[in-house]
Image (cartoon, rainbow, N blue to C red):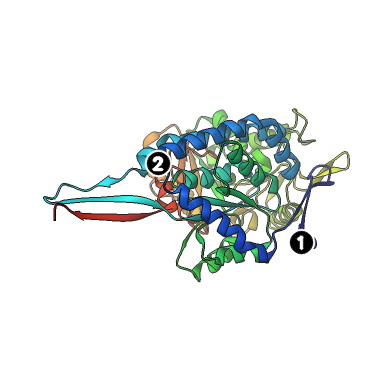
Amino acid sequence: MAHDKKLIVDDPFTLEPFVERPLLQADAVDALVRRSARAEVDWAAVPVSRRAELCGKFVDAFLARKEEIARDLTGQMGKPLVQARREVDGTADRARHMISIAEASLADEPLPPKPGFVRFIRREPLGVVLDIAAWNYPLLIAVNVVVPAVLAGNSVLLKHSSRTPLCGEHFERAFREAGAPDGLVLAVHADHSVTERIIQHPGVGFVSFTGSVEGGRQVYRAVSSRFIDCGLELGGKDPAYVCADADFAFAAENVADGAFYNAGQSCCGVERVYVERPIYERFVEALVQSARALRMGDPRDPETTLGPMAQPSGVRTLAAQVSEARAAGARVLCGGEPASIGGKGRFFAPTVVADATHRMSVMVEESFGPVVAVASVESDAEALEKMNDSPYGLTASVWTRDDARASAIASRVVTGTVYQNRCDFLDPALPWVGVKDSGKGCTLSRLGFAQLTRPKSFHLRLGV
């Protein structure tokens, strides 16, 4: 939280201050953006091959500090250290994929020959990209924009969440250690009003925001006064449909992991599950067993599999949703209440809510915690109707051995990504995109470069 232009972040387990940083002052915005813009002018003229080389060195520098970065991540948002190390590795993997496809994705696109003319389309950078990144997967969310933006010839202002400011600093330092020009990637610590001032600055060419739906609305309103675009990755209430013919043990294990990994603090985590009636009770019991097997504790302990909630408000939201569901007739089969370990930590016990309906907030409003709601369905048609009965559309999963059945269902789910027999996973070769209140635009894949560039047409008459 901000105090007198100062950012103070607590450790979600010890509840003691973990990091403190000064906040950017409003009168410093112009100099910041101009510094970033100066770096971009020269960087835009650098060949893509050299941009890729720099980003490769960034990855090396980032991995060289893997343990430090992982420990800072754990201290800021409570992710178990084992999972934090995996996030560092995943960040490198995504960066390397985007590096590997950059030259082909950003190459000039020639048009069919026309006598006397040369015609082609070039993707040119937008200038200064402002990336407003979220705290729940703070490295993975940031890399989705930062590395592709740099590869495309932009400079980046990385305004990370007030929960995870050190993550932005790690990106800036790794680029600096890789030999990036001064100002190419800069970490920014700013409150809402100063962030809006950055958005309004004429030197900013694009804004990317990952966070809540309401936060997305605020960013979109701020951007709307200017003729620039923005990418928004917002909330999710992602469904899983488990068919009676699914590989039961595999589906149960993976759906549970999709619901509880990262303490459920994932916009693409599984929050609601529809199960065909013949296996419903058995599947619910399997989820309960998985929830009870999780170990809450100090996130620095390698035996911990469920860390504390990053934000105090998250615990209150979950408690209210579960209480309402119980009062409306749902069965709360495990968890359902805040917890602590030895008096430490803001935990919420992993929770399974059975017999949930769409009249309950736990089934329709984003939970963003270790709570999964489950309902039985009689048919694919009913499952589809309920999966699509949501203001969100980020991911959805179908669990069945019948490939044709999965394909038929997948084609009718209104979502950005649909899975068969997996969930809560991002493949950087595929565009990461949401529909409805889950956002607009996309990151990653070759299409991810499109929103970070503008097309420029070359129409050249020869020999005159």
Q: Residue furthest left?
A: 115
Where is mark 2, residue-wise?
Answer: 47
Q: Depth-wise, is mark 2 or mark 1 nearer the camera?
A: 2
Horizontal side, residue 43 vs residue 273: left or right: left
Q: Secondary structure at mark 1?
A: loop
At 65% across and 64% down in the image, what residue appears? 194
451 or 269: which is nearer to us?
451
318 or 82: which is nearer to us?
82
At 50% across and 69% down in the image, what residue appears? 224
> Gap in Å between the C-alphas at discs 2 and 1?
40 Å
Q: Quadrant of the N terminus?
A: bottom right
User: How far across and how far down the image is residue 209, in percent?
Assistant: 56, 55
Image height of 354 relative to 82, above or below? below
Horizontal side, residue 107 vs residue 221: left or right: left
Q: Secondary structure at mark 2?
A: loop
Q: Residue furthest right?
A: 343
Number of numbered labels in the structure image: 2
Horizontal side, residue 170 vs residue 304: left or right: left
Can you tell which mark lies on residue 5? 1
User: How far across and how far down the image is residue 102, in percent?
Assistant: 41, 39
Q: Residues within 10 Å of mark 2 (few under 14, many from 20)?
A: few
Q: Quadrant of the C terminus?
A: bottom left
